[in-house]
Amino acid sequence: MTDVDPPVRPAPGEHAEEGTADGVKRGKVLVVGLDGVRFDRLTRSPFRTPVLHGLIAAGTHGTSLLPYGEVDGQAEGGPSTSMAYTDSGPGWSSVLTGVWPDRHGVTGNDFTGADYSRYPDFLSRAVAARPGLRTAAAVSWAELVHRGTLGPAIGRRVLHDGEAEGYEAADRLVADTAAHWLTHGDPDAVFVYFGAADEAGHATGPLSPAYDNALLAQDAHLGRLLDAIGSRRSQPGRADEHWTVLVTTDHGHLDTGGHGGDTRAEREVFVILAEPGVPGGTLLDTPRLIDLAPTVLDRLGVPVDPAWGLQGSVLLRSAQLGPVTAVDF
C-alpha cells in the first residue's frame, strides 16, 4: 500500500462541522469506477452482479457513447473525431475533470499533454471551494495518482498497485480501505477505482468466465461499500445523512478483448446513480462521463463556476427528485 498523503488536511476519519453557515446540511458522495466494464455483460443476468442490479433497481441509470476513439475503420457511423483513444487515461480524466480530452489534454495512457492544473479532479475542486470537506480516493491503478489525475489537494490518496500486487488482490485492498473510511471515518466525498475486470478483458476477453468472475468480485466489493454506508444510519448523528452513489466505467472492450478504437463495444459507457428521492428503476437520458464531476459538486453544495469551463451537466438536479426517502443500499 502507498498512502500517498499522510493526513495533514481534514481526513476521512477526522471530525468536521456537518452543516454550513446557512444551516443547510450538505450531501455526501461515493463514486465507484469500474475499469473496462461492458454494460451488456454487466446487466445480462442479475445472478452475475446482484449488487449492481439492486442499485439499478433502487436508482437510475443510462448509457452513452464516448465522442472519441481511434478511427480505425472498424466502426460504421463511428465518431467524427479521433481526439483520443478509448483508453483509461482519457476516460478517467474525463470522469474526474468534467471535460473531454480536447480540454484536459489526455489522449492515451501516456498522459502526454495533461492539463490538470487548469482542469483538476472534482475532489480537488470541492476542497478548494469548501476547505473543510473530507475527501479521499483509493485506487488500484497507479497512474491515477502518479500522473496527477487525482491531485494532491485531496485529503487522502491511497494506492494499492494492481500492476505490482495483481489487480484481484489490489482491488480487494482498495475495498478494505474504502470500507474502513466509510465505517469508522466521516468522509464527505470518496472516489474508488477497481481494475480487475479490465485486466480480465485484456487477457481473455469480456465474454470469458474470467471476466464474469472479475465482475462478480467487483460487485461484492461494491456491496461492502454500500453496506458500510447503510450501517451509518444506526450511528449517532448520522441517521439523516444524504448519500449519492455513482458507478461508472471509462470504456468498453471488443469481444476478443482490448480497446482504443471507435466501435460501439469500445465506446459505450454507463452511469448508475442512486440517492434518496430518485425514482427506482428509471432511465437517465444518455449520461456522459463528463456529467459526473458537476453532479458530485452539486451534491456537495459546491456551485459550478462557469469560468472552470466544465462541459458536463448535473444529473438529476434537486428539483427533478421525488420525495426524499431512504435508499436501501
Image: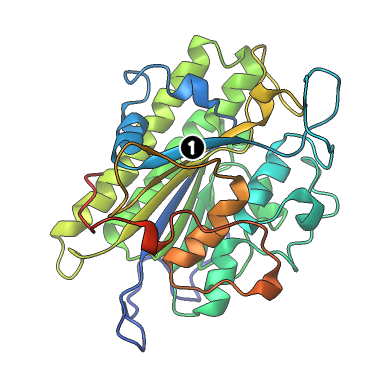
Residue 281 locus on image (x, y percent): 33, 36
Image quadrant in which you'd find residue 236: bottom left
Image quadrant in which you'd find residue 140: top right
**In the figure, 19 relative to 120: above or below?**
below
Quick one: SS at disc 1?
strand
Residue 315 locus on image (x, y percent): 48, 54
Residue drawn 72% across the image and 51% down it? 100
Residue 211 locus on image (x, y percent): 52, 18
Where does the C terminus fall, quadrant-wise?
Answer: top left
Is 21 displayed left or right of 285 in the figure?
Answer: left
Residue drawn 62% across the image and 38% down it? 250
**In the figure, 266 relative to 92: above or below?**
above
- Return the residue found at the far bottom: 21
Crowding around mark 1 (Cα neighbors within 10 Å: few <14, some 14 to 19, many 20+) is: some
The answer to which of 227 and 304 lies nearer the viewer is 304
- Residue type, numbered disc 1: Gly
The answer to which of 67 and 123 lies nearer the viewer is 67
Is 286 displayed left or right of 118 in the figure?
Answer: left
Q: How many marks?
A: 1
Residue drawn 54% across the image and 53% down it? 292
Residue 40 locus on image (x, y percent): 51, 21
Q: Does the image show residue 3? A: no
Image quadrant in which you'd find residue 152: bottom right
| Residue at image mark 1 | 62
Is 139 displayed left or right of 52 in the figure?
Answer: right
The answer to which of 314 and 193 lies nearer the viewer is 314
Q: How is the image coloured?
A: rainbow
Q: Does the image show residue 212? A: yes
The answer to which of 305 and 156 lies nearer the viewer is 305
**In the figure, 22 relative to 296: above or below?**
below
